[in-house]
Amino acid sequence: MINEALVELCIVSYSVTRQEARMYSKYLAHAEPDVYNMRLFDAAAATSSAPLYWELKETTLPDNSTEVLIDGGVVMNNPSIYAQSLALIERMNS
């Protein structure tokens, strides 16, 4: 699970179901576990599922809802600014 990662991470994908970007991190997995805590394998498969090359990644969230995810590069090709924002939010809340 993402909340058990040994280091902070930032995995970006896009939820086709909810039509919004998803940024999976250890911090967000603790803050909103029903949305952001999933198996690392599922998050990696989601961020790698480019819609023209591979199948969409359908995953079940901890609250038992189903979500269809695709490659985060579809909406944010360079997630470094999002990772920086996440680091600032985490720093302000600690």
Image (tube, rainbow, N blue to C red):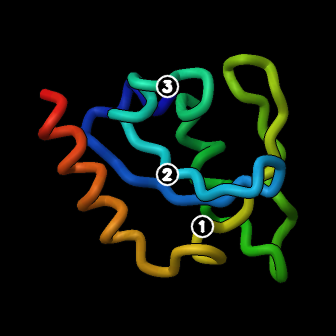
Q: Is residue 71 above or below residue 31?
A: below
Q: Are marks 3 and 2 in contact (CB under 8 Å)?
A: no
Please tell me which of labels 3 and 1 falls first in the chain. Answer: 3
The one of 62 and 6 positioned closer to us in this rendering: 62
| Left or right of 50 on screen, residue 13 | left
Please tell me which of labels 1 and 2 falls first in the chain. Answer: 2
* Residue 90 position in % (x across, y down): 21, 38
Q: CA distance from mark 1 to mark 2?
A: 8 Å
**Residue 13 picture quarter:** bottom right
Circle 3 is placed at which residue position? 32
Q: Which mark is residue 23?
A: 2
What amino acid is at disc 2?
A: Met
| Left or right of 27 on screen, residue 32 | right
Q: Are marks 1 and 2 in contact (CB under 8 Å)?
A: yes
Q: Residues within 10 Å of mark 2 (few under 14, many from 20)?
A: many
User: Which secondary structure, mark 2?
Assistant: strand
